[in-house]
Amino acid sequence: MAKLTKRVVDASIKTAVEDKRETLATCSTVPGFYVRVKPTGVAHYYFRYRWGGARHRIALGRHGAVTVDDARAAAQAHATTLMKGEDPKTQRQAAEAAPTMDTLADEYMAKHAKPFKKSWAKDESRLRLYIRPRLGALRVAAVTRDHVRTVLTNVGKTHPGAANKVLALLSKMFSLAVEWGYRLDNPCKGLSRSAKKGGAKFPSKDVHHYLSADEIGSLLDALGGLSDAVAAAAIRWIMYTGCRHDEALSLRWSNVDAERGRVKYEDTKTGDQWRPVAQAALDVLHDLDRPEVGDAFVFPSPRSPHRKRASLYHQWEQARETAELGSCRLHDLRHTAASLAAANGASLSQIGAMLGHKSPQATFIYAHLVDADVRAVANGVGDAIAAASKAAKGNAVGRPRSSSLQARQDRP
């Protein structure tokens, strides 16, 4: 008995075909590993062993589909399992029954994302675009940190902002996988810790684009040229109020309180909220049709006033290109509204109330805008003191010296 190699397998195939009989060749290095060749020349690798007083056989693959070296490695793994006092077939069946990443993704959406996250559609999109194509067929327990790092690297080359979101999504999925007993650890944990130190995070491009006065004017002109007047009004509404895209499309006429200058956004990321709006924003609604029957949407679908519009992204792309705003996103109108509020002296808490932020931390990204106004005030104070100091020094020029000071200076 010799080591089972490709040369030995090829010789066995030749013998089986020429003699028109089944042949079998075993391996000297891994007990129980062998190849069985049929008279047709088709060969299969197997691992055989005894367990519980009975003989068992595990198929390792067809010759050609797997190499003899790969088959030997699989046989060696089964032999190692046997030496540990475990049944290789039972372990293999358990592994084959273990959920894949596609299964975990389905459970994540059904048990966590859809019941508890208002932004579940974004998770579903990231799963479809980035995670399922790369990890979907892998067993949950088999995914390593290198697998995750490879996914993040590939996504981060073209979509750095998305890579950060994918990392957060995978981390949550694996945390639930640990809770559900699918694996013992979270392969994203090390990556998450290094991300906080700048190791795994990808720099986002054009995260915040604050529109200048000229850009705002160009955008308003471009919106005036859109054929979809309702969509144009919705984009202007977002610009004036700083609301989120879905909040604008979910707004109903019954929640517009023009007398008090406020609107109610239902089922937002932070719950139902009444928010103040400017008169200029309310003026946007004047030219829109409000059905007399039923509680219609303010910016409805073109098909029906009682049907929610799917999105504004197509119209936004048209307006953005016409206004030549580069990579500016629709969500950047929200950031622009916050920057304009800060420029007009609003505090962080006031900006948070306008945007509907639940926690002060969410508004802290605009702290540098408020700081700029505070610095301007501080500079004003400093300039006033400097001017007063300069004036005082000027008044002191030519003033008679006091007798005591003169006496001290006249001493020898």
Image: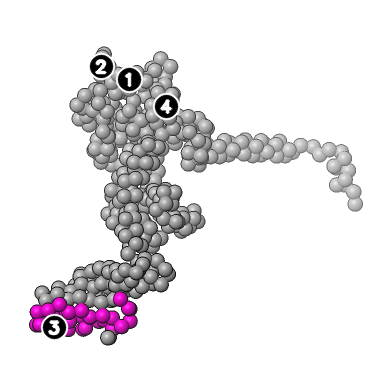
Secondary structure of the residue carrying tag 2 is loop
Q: Residues within 10 Å of mark 4 (few under 14, many from 20)?
A: few
**Identity, as a three-letter code, of the amino acid under mark 4:** Asp
Residue 283 visible within the image: no
* Precedes in sequence: disc 1 or disc 2: 1
User: Quick one: 273 or 206, which is closer to the camera?
Assistant: 273
* Precedes in sequence: disc 2 or disc 4: 4
Q: Residue at x 42, y 19 (%)?
A: 261
Residue 318 horizontal side relative to residue 349, left or right = left
Q: Nearer the viewer, mark 2 or mark 4?
A: 4
Q: Which mark is residue 253?
A: 1
**Identity, as a three-letter code, of the amino acid under mark 1:** Trp
Residue 410, image x, y percentages: 88, 47
Q: Quadrant of residue 97?
A: bottom left
Residue 19, image x, y percentages: 10, 82
**Identity, as a three-letter code, of the amino acid under mark 3:** Thr
- Residue that mark 2 sits on: 291
User: Quick one: 258 or 280, which is closer to the camera?
Assistant: 258
- Residue that mark 4 sits on: 272
* Precedes in sequence: disc 1 or disc 3: 3
Q: Nearer the viewer, mark 1 or mark 3?
A: 3
Secondary structure of the residue carrying tag 3 is helix
Q: Nearer the viewer, mark 1 or mark 4?
A: 4
